[in-house]
Image: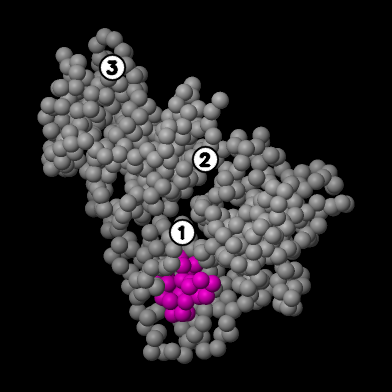
Amino acid sequence: MSERDDRLFELVRAATVHLLPADGKDSPLWGSGFFVAPGWVLTAAHVLRPHLAADRTTVFRVRGEGIDAEARLAEWLITDPRSPKVPLAEDLALVRLTGEHLHECVWLTDRAARHTGALKACGYYPGPPEAHFRIVDAWINGHEDTYGLIIKSDIDIPSGMSGGPLLDPETGAVVGLIKSRRKDKDGGKAVAVAALRRFGETYRTVMADHDRWHGEEPMSQSGDNWVELQHGPADGQGAVWTPRDRREALALLAALPPPPDEPTVKVIAKMARSGNQWPGATPELRTWRDGHGLLYEGTAPLDPLTFLRYLRLVEAHACARDAGSPLLARWIERRLRRDTRRYMHAYARDVSLPGELRPPPEADGPERVVISYPGPGEGPVVALLLDPVIGAQPVRFFWQIWYDDGDGLPEVHETDASVRGYRPDELVQALRVPLGGLLESKDREGHPVPLEVALPAEYFDTAVHRWRFADIAALNDPGHLGARRRLVLRALERRGEPDNLWIDRWRSMTAGRRFQGWRIPPPGVVDATGYRTAELDRIPVMCRPAGQGTGRVAMKHALSGGHSVALWHIGPHPERGACLPECDTLHARVEKFLETLGSLAELPDRLRHVRQDISEQRPDSTWAEPLALLYDDPRRPLPGEEIETVDAPL
């Protein structure tokens, strides 16, 4: 072992801690963790869950070399605290110290590519008489799902090290977190650092703190600096991207406003690579740092001019929004002067933003831009499938999230791993991270990605447009899903290949430019015949819920009659007797609303505008608050069932 490795391991030790109850000097440890930014500790969620499931505000202790402080859970990725096991992709938790303390922080890799090969597993294990720090050799010989790392079976991971860091001694970066040892065997599992990105906005905050802290070149008590101990090529003629270059660049990027959306980072990173795609799938890209992490081949950074071109494009993006960084611009020029290949500097210097990354033009007057709903190949769509658990009373749902990027076939993003499913009132909390995080990452500036929620028709009155994933929304940002994005319902029973009646009616309606409401159930119509022969410019409208009684029968006939668009009121309605006076008002307002459409594809966004008015408490818009919208495009059918229906567990 080299002197450099010994010094690096001392820094890892100084940044690694163990977690234990707030009271009692000799209390047993819960598990390990490590500092990733000032005041921020990363650990495994399963380490904290047994102690915090009943009360997540419980105070506990973080103890390590030179640190003994109170802390609280800031956030974890667990969606179902009742589940006996924490899924691998959810086994992360961020802990916040309750006061300010001086401490070391690890360096987290910016590369999203998962590690393979030799590592050092670090953490604490129980005494007696007290917990002890330990570093053991580990080897990653496989991957699991999106974020999993498989630790070779002949590696001994002592109990208590769960939540500790996995250090790559070759690059001097932490690449993962220990999840678990194998029961009664050697080896185990770990979670790649890239899973941190699932924390969304909190990830942005933590990583900005991380990069700013390291950018100040802090020295440990031993006089060492984390980045200075990292292996990297010599600076030479400026023709290599060194660990010091990376540290300074990431600190400058952390000072910029974060990217408005994931596609912006993807476009800029691809431009920096001369249009060439990086190997493997595209990870979540929530920060400018994440785009920097795409400029590698394996563990080796690409040519420095590639990184400088990326930085110049990011700086141009910021300047176009009056948020440019003179510090970043000057640093790019200084770094270019160190590179002796003058004839190649134009590659990094002469860049311009493509039209899609320029700020949208200011709208003239109060008129809003209407965004058409995407058809096949016309843009991204997120779909949430809610499948009722057979035999469950009251109703429970299993969920599945699909993503269609508009360039190919839709793919499963995440599937419910629970055993019993979720009650309707539990769905928002369960979907907060997997669905809320996906929507946030796929939103374009000024173009939030549409969301389709597929349910059996009998559950069409589920008020998904009222869901809210953010506990606190910005004052200028409508917090509810229906006000934030185009949100439509789809009929789950239609999944798979569409029938000709459905396709033909859709084709005729999308060719039209004028539409009118058709009040259903129509007087005297008791079977599906009238629904099949309804005029092609008619959009069924109900002033009653679609999931029960007369409304449920009417919706069933509408679906069997090939109708793919409908509006209805999810609130209460007398089951027997005449409609209420407000029913006539609703139909009249819907009729006036439909007159604003120039095409069928405008309907979801036009309704979103009205919902936004409601969210902003604008007058004369509350009539639409209980409205739900079916928008069921047969050209993009829901994926068919691949497994048999799961019954409710006993």
Task: Please tell me which of labels 3 and 2 falls first in the chain.
Answer: 2
Task: Please tell me which of labels 1 and 2 falls first in the chain.
Answer: 1
Residue 633: percent from left, percent from top = 25, 40
> Quick check: is 310 in the magenta stretch?
yes
Label 3 belongs to which residue?
550
SS at mark 2?
loop
- As displayed, is residue 492 above or below residue 167? above
Image quadrant containing the N terminus? bottom right
Chain part drawn in magenta: 291-315
Amino acid bearing label 3 = Thr
Amino acid bearing label 1 = Pro
Label 2 belongs to which residue?
417
- As displayed, is residue 381 above or below residue 313? above
Question: Residue 390 falls in which quadrant of the image?
Answer: top left
Label 1 belongs to which residue?
283
Dot 3, crowdedness within 10 Å: few (<14), some or many (≥20)?
Answer: some
Q: In the figure, is residue 379 to the left or right of 168?
A: left
Dot 1, crowdedness within 10 Å: few (<14), some or many (≥20)?
Answer: some
Foreground pick, 116 / 629 = 116
Figure label count: 3
The residue sitting at 57% across, 49% down in the picture is 88
> Quick check: is 344 in the magenta stretch?
no
- Farthest residue, direction right: 129
Residue 552: percent from left, percent from top = 30, 21
Residue 477: percent from left, percent from top = 41, 45
Image quadrant containing the C terminus? top right
Foreground pick, 514 / 551 = 551
The residue sitting at 44% across, 63% down in the picture is 280
